[in-house]
Image (spheres, helix red, strand yellow):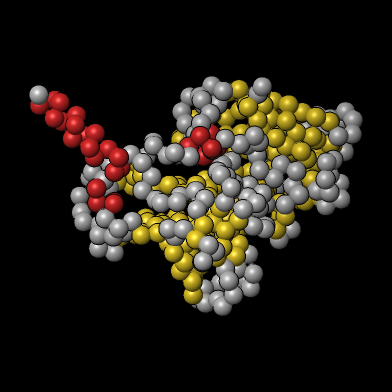
């Protein structure tokens, strides 16, 4: 009888913490009078023009998403947020529950800096994360924390724009970790973003970086791409004694729903100045500070104009918390890269 009572008690409280605590989390319901998603409030300081609305042309789930625009470009003294108060709902979550706060976001144009946070004034708790999002790419960001045995009062969740011309949010979640209703949406076709180098900010392809510990050169070529205008180049007149690399930080949230041991195929186009020029490409995975997998396509050469290169590897047995992809010059000469993809092998 005691076991039956305990089971009934658990069943009675489960709905309070096994589901999304945010109302209208996919922003499908619109407040027609305010022209914003229902159940969300606007926090706005520093700008006069309309900044908050919804978008019915771009959505990760359903038809609508929440939009914040800042066409003025002003950031100093500006606060632009969507806020939702949780009332007393969060206090019904059992102490010790691991909580996930997450949202999908993308920049309206170029890049945007975004802030997502949970705050309880009464409980003196703040869980916050800032991150960068890109045009043309939905990115999921999340933070996790333990529900403590304190009175949280009426906490709230905020989704905000810090810089950039605008951001679109969708599929916000606050609830038990591992029960996110939007988890299945986190699947992308190409694990490398901006592999054609067409999205550029401040003369650099977005989401790419340069590692140069040589006398060589890494540069963006704006009139030599194989599928568009742009490609990237590595060149050195001397023997490469250090690292000369174009690097790319992979979005590890995209690997959350990829099973360990899954075959992944990297495909790219490369072009060298001469047949003797040697290059390679590879990817690395980490769990915390520990390397859990390095997969290298060694000693590549090209014998003609743009040439396709392929390399297949299997994902690590441990879910990664960090991942990177690299293009590296290994000899004197020059090599150009374009049209890079990393996909689950069919």
Left or right of 104? Residue 86 is: left
Count of numbered circles on the image: 0
Is 282 in front, or is 236?
A: 282
Q: Is residue 301 above or below residue 72?
A: above
**As drawn, which residue projects farthest toward the left?**
1
- The residue at the point 63 percent across, 27 percent down is 344
Expressed as whole percent of the image width and height from the top left, the position of residue 65 reads 56, 53
Whether residue 209 is visible to the viewer of this picture, yes or no, is no
Nearer to us in this view, 325 or 138: 138
Instruction: Find residue 11 and report its image quarter.
Output: top left
x%, y% of residue 17? 30, 42
Placement of 169 over or under 345, stated as above or below: below
37 left or right of 150?
right
Residue sitting at 84 percent across and 49 percent down? 229
> Would you place residue 108 above or below residue 148 in this image?
below
Within the image, what quadrant is residue 43 found in?
Answer: bottom left
Q: Identify the residue at image location x=29%, y=64%.
A: 121
Please state the horizontal and vertical placement of residue 100, each as a whole percent of the image: 38, 45
Task: Tell me if residue 287 can be seen.
Answer: yes
Quadrant in which the C terminus appears: top right
**Quadrant of the rendering where the N terminus is positioned:** top left
* Horizontal arrangement in the rendering, residue 50 relative to residue 92 (left or right): right
Q: Nearer the viewer, residue 20 or 124?
A: 20
Residue 233 picture location, percent across and down: 78, 45
């Amino acid at each position: 009888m005691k076991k039956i009572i305990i089971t009934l008690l658990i069943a009675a409280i489960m709905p309070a913490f096994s589901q999304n605590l945010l109302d209208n989390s996919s922003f499908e319901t619109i407040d027609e009078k305010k022209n914003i998603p229902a159940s969300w409030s606007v926090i706005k300081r520093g700008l006069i023009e309309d900044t908050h609305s919804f978008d019915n042309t771009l959505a990760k789930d359903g038809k609508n998403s929440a939009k914040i625009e800042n066409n003025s470009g002003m950031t100093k003294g500006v606060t632009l947020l969507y806020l939702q108060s949780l009332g007393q709902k969060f206090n019904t979550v059992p102490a010790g529950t691991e909580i996930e706060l997450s949202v999908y976001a993308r920049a309206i144009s170029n890049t945007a800096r975004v802030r997502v946070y949970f705050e309880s004034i009464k409980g003196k708790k703040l869980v916050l994360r800032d991150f960068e999002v890109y045009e043309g790419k939905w990115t999921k960001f999340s933070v996790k924390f333990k529900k403590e045995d304190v009175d949280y009062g009426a906490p709230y969740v905020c989704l905000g724009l810090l810089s950039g011309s605008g951001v679109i949010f969708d599929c916000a979640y606050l609830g038990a970790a591992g029960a996110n209703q939007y988890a299945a949406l986190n699947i992308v076709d190409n694990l490398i973003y901006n592999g054609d180098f067409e999205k550029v900010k401040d003369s650099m392809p977005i989401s790419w970086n340069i590692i140069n510990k040589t006398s060589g050169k890494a540069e963006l070529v704006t009139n030599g791409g194989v599928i568009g205008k742009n490609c990237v180049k590595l060149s050195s007149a001397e023997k490469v004694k250090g690292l000369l690399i174009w690097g790319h930080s992979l979005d590890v949230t995209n690997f959350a729903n990829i099973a360990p041991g899954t075959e992944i195929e990297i495909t790219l186009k490369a072009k060298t100045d001469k047949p003797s020029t040697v290059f390679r490409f590879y990817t690395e995975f980490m769990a915390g500070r520990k390397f859990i997998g390095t997969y290298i396509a060694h000693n590549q050469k090209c014998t003609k104009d743009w040439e396709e290169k392929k390399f297949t590897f299997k994902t690590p047995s441990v879910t990664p918390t960090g991942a990177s992809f690299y293009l590296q010059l290994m000899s004197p000469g020059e090599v150009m890269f374009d049209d890079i993809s990393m996909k689950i092998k069919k």
